[in-house]
Image (cartoon, coloured by chain):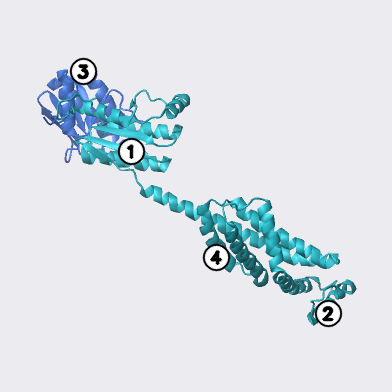
């Protein structure tokens, strides 16, 4: 083994000859020697990767382009980002500490998530880089299979850890964004609007989930008590979709309002939603619905005994 | 009849009976309340009954079913029942537990309940409580 190893690498220093001597009689003392050797190998690797930085990076960018990843980015951005990813990558190999990379990955994610870059792309490019570098190592050490094996032993765990770190950072960042947006949606709490004496409107905008539906019902019931409402118009024009859960929440809201003495008119059921509800078999027979908000308001005014008249005496539609 | 302060007061107002529940009732008290109220419906020949539960922040299913049965019994004896003053939390809990009032009417508060009874018993549509339209 040592016989073959010695002449192989011109860059090897005197340390290496030392090393090979250790390796020769290593059959019993195995583990510590191997890891010591790996520690030797990594700086070598890093030196190699630094040396061929421009070429390897070019190759990597070419591979990214071939696989159509990161198409949201311009070539200049791609060049800048790939350079820093490359440098960070090599740095992690050198230092073994992923902290800086974590930081960078989070930072990068923050920049690229809003531009629609997907998780598979980020993981994809990191894996591509890993492959490109591994390929170059193959090339470099192809004449010595045993040494190549040891090089890969040193390289692969580190590379995997990097891929893992980047993926996790990206997903973490994504989740942070999602949480932030959820908070924002929650703060966009549904307003309960008094439009006339004893008439409330509750426009529902956005997706209704269980939590939000409950919050909404609570607000509505408190609104009914505060404003002494007799009629409530719930407008769901802004709700993109209605499923069984949402429909049941609506029914509950209507029932609870009725318990507090207010009648509810639901408006803005789109043809699709109406069809869905019928198909789902939700029992809406006890629920008063009108086509649009205008119709709902007119009906509510009728229930309350209001009549809206134009000043010039022209008939209202 | 009760020892200590009254848990429920039943007042007579014309042909209506107004029962206010002041505090949460246990099952025995609930049953006694039902007996008293139904007795009085017969005694005073009441046409309408209002049960005010505004002071309650919890209402269990037994209590609720008792109130509902009061409504049904009262109807058989010729009186309309309105439950008034159900609090938002109570209303929410009731629908989540699947309690339905069935034929028993509900209203926001005592005033609304009286309006509702007036409307029902005089046979006109329920509009009496609406504020007059600005002319």
Residue ID for mark 2:
A17
Labels 4 and 2: the sequence-earlier one: 2
| Subunit of label 3 | B
Residue ID for mark 4:
A103
Placement of the N terminus of chain B among the 4 image quadrants = top left
CA gap, disc 3 to disc 4? Answer: 77 Å
Q: Residue at x 34, y 37 (%)?
A: B93
Task: Tell me, yes or no, whether dots 4 and 2 are on the same chain.
Answer: yes
Task: Tell me, yes or no, whether dots 2 and 3 are on the same chain.
Answer: no
Residue ID for mark 3:
B77
Crowd class of label 4 (few under 14; some 14 to 19; many from 20; radius 10 Å): some
Please state if A64 lies on the left or on the right of B122 as rendered.
right
Task: Tell me, yes or no, whether dots 2 and 1 are on the same chain.
Answer: yes
Residue ID for mark 1:
A203
Residue B81 visible within the image: yes
CA gap, disc 4 to disc 1? Answer: 42 Å
Question: CB atoms at circles 4 and 1 under 8 Å apart?
Answer: no
């Amino acid at each position: 083994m040592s016989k073959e190893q010695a002449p192989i690498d011109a860059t090897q220093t005197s340390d290496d000859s030392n090393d090979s001597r250790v390796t020769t009689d290593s059959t019993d003392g195995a583990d510590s020697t191997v890891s010591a050797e790996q520690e030797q190998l990594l700086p070598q690797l890093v030196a190699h990767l630094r040396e061929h930085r421009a070429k390897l990076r070019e190759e990597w960018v070419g591979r990214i382009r071939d696989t159509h990843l990161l198409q949201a980015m311009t070539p200049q951005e791609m060049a800048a980002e790939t350079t820093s990813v490359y440098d960070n990558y090599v740095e992690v190999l050198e230092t073994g500490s992923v902290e800086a990379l974590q930081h960078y990955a989070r930072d990068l994610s923050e920049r690229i998530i809003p531009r629609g870059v997907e998780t598979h792309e980020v993981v994809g490019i990191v894996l591509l880089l890993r492959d490109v570098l591994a390929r170059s190592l193959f090339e470099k050490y192809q004449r010595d299979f045993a040494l190549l094996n040891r090089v890969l032993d040193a390289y692969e765990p580190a590379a995997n850890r990097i891929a893992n770190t980047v993926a996790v950072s990206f997903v973490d960042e994504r989740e942070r964004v999602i949480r932030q947006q959820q908070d924002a949606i929650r703060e966009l709490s549904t307003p309960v609007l008094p439009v006339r004496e004893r008439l409330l409107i509750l426009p529902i905008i956005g997706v209704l989930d269980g939590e939000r539906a409950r919050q909404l019902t609570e607000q509505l019931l408190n609104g009914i008590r505060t404003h002494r409402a007799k009629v409530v118009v719930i407008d769901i024009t802004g709700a993109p979709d209605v499923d069984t859960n949402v429909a049941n929440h609506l029914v509950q809201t209507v029932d609870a309002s009725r318990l507090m003495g207010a009648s509810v008119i639901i408006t803005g059921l789109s043809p699709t939603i109406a069809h869905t509800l019928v198909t789902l078999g939700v029992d809406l027979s006890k629920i008063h619905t009108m086509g649009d908000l205008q119709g709902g308001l007119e009906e509510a005014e009728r229930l309350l005994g209001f009549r809206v008249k134009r000043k010039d005496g022209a008939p209202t539609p | 009849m009760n020892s200590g302060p009254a848990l429920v007061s039943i007042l007579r107002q014309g042909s209506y009976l107004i029962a206010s529940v002041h505090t949460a009732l246990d099952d025995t008290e609930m049953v006694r309340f039902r007996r008293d109220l139904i007795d009085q419906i017969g005694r005073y020949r009441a046409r309408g009954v209002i049960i005010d539960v505004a002071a309650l922040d919890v209402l269990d299913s037994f209590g609720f079913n008792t109130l509902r049965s009061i409504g049904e019994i009262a109807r058989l004896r010729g009186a309309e029942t309105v439950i008034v003053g159900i609090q938002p939390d109570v209303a929410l809990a009731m629908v989540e537990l699947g309690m339905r009032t069935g034929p028993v009417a509900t209203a926001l508060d005592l005033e609304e309940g009286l309006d509702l009874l007036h409307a029902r018993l005089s046979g006109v549509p329920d509009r009496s409580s609406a504020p007059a339209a600005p002319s």
